[in-house]
């Protein structure tokens, strides 16, 4: 496992020693960031200088990739002890300034952020019905900013009902995974904004 782009490109990530943590593969991570940075409804402005939240962080690969590619800051949510150990080892190995880790269950958060986040990654264990409850908890407790981009990874055969506070921008398979890119906020207003950006209004 390595960082695949940006100023930290090529740096190795410590992999988890057990099967409970399933890191996003290098190929899927590269696909994710290519879409994030080059899709006409997304683009570099959704990442550069933004506050990023990596939920079900595991090794921290998604958050560290975002930091490598220009995010202002990254915070992590993870509560599995073995995953937390790997996450801390990766942050230490990268010799980065102290990054915030919330040792929390994403479905039952007990704290609220100082300010909402601009870009949120969610990559929970597959087939455990964790995505939607986590999203609802994050939204109702002020973790998702208006217009924030939410990127979810799930198994290719998983189907979820996108919460009403999100608008689906794009869904894309990647190997055994499926990536969904959404924007947080009033769906009608966001659709109008996306049409204007695309010159369709």
Image (cartoon, rainbow, N blue to C red):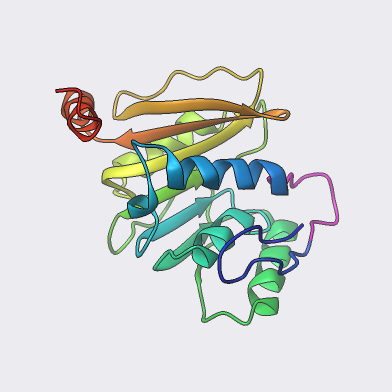
Magenta segment boundaries in residue numbering = 15-24
Is residue 9 left or right of 180 when viewed as pictured? Answer: right
| Point 57% across, 63% down: residue | 64
Q: Is residue 16 magenta?
A: yes
| Point 27% across, 60% down: residue | 115
Number of numbered callouts drawn: 0
Q: Residue furthest front?
A: 199
Q: Is residue 195 above or below residue 65?
A: above
- Characterize the magenta stretch by its predominant secondary structure: loop
Q: In which quarter of the view is residue 4 placed?
A: bottom right
| Point 38% across, 46% down: residue | 43
Quarter placement of the N terminus: bottom right
The reply to whether residue 103 is in sight is no
Is residue 104 left or right of 182 when viewed as pictured? Answer: right
Q: In which quarter of the view is residue 86 placed?
A: bottom right
Q: Position of residue 113 (x, y in %)?
A: 33, 60
């Amino acid at each position: 496992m390595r960082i695949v782009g940006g100023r930290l490109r090529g740096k190795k990530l410590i992999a988890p020693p057990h099967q409970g943590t399933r890191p996003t593969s290098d190929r899927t991570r590269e696909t994710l960031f290519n879409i994030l940075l080059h899709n006409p409804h997304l683009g570099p402005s959704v990442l550069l200088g933004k506050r990023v939240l990596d939920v079900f962080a595991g090794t921290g690969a998604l958050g560290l990739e975002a930091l490598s590619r220009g995010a202002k800051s990254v915070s992590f949510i993870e509560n599995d002890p073995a995953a937390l150990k790997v996450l801390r080892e990766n942050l230490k190995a990268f010799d980065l300034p102290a990054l915030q880790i919330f040792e929390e269950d994403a479905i039952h958060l007990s704290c609220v952020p100082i300010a909402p986040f601009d870009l949120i990654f969610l990559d929970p264990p597959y087939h455990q019905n964790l995505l939607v409850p986590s999203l609802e908890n994050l939204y109702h407790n002020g973790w998702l900013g208006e217009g924030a981009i939410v990127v979810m990874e799930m198994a290719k055969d998983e189907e979820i009902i996108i919460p009403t506070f999100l608008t689906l921008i794009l869904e894309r398979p990647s190997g055994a995974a499926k990536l969904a890119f959404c924007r947080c906020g009033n769906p009608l207003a966001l659709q109008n904004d996306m049409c204007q950006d695309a010159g369709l209004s």
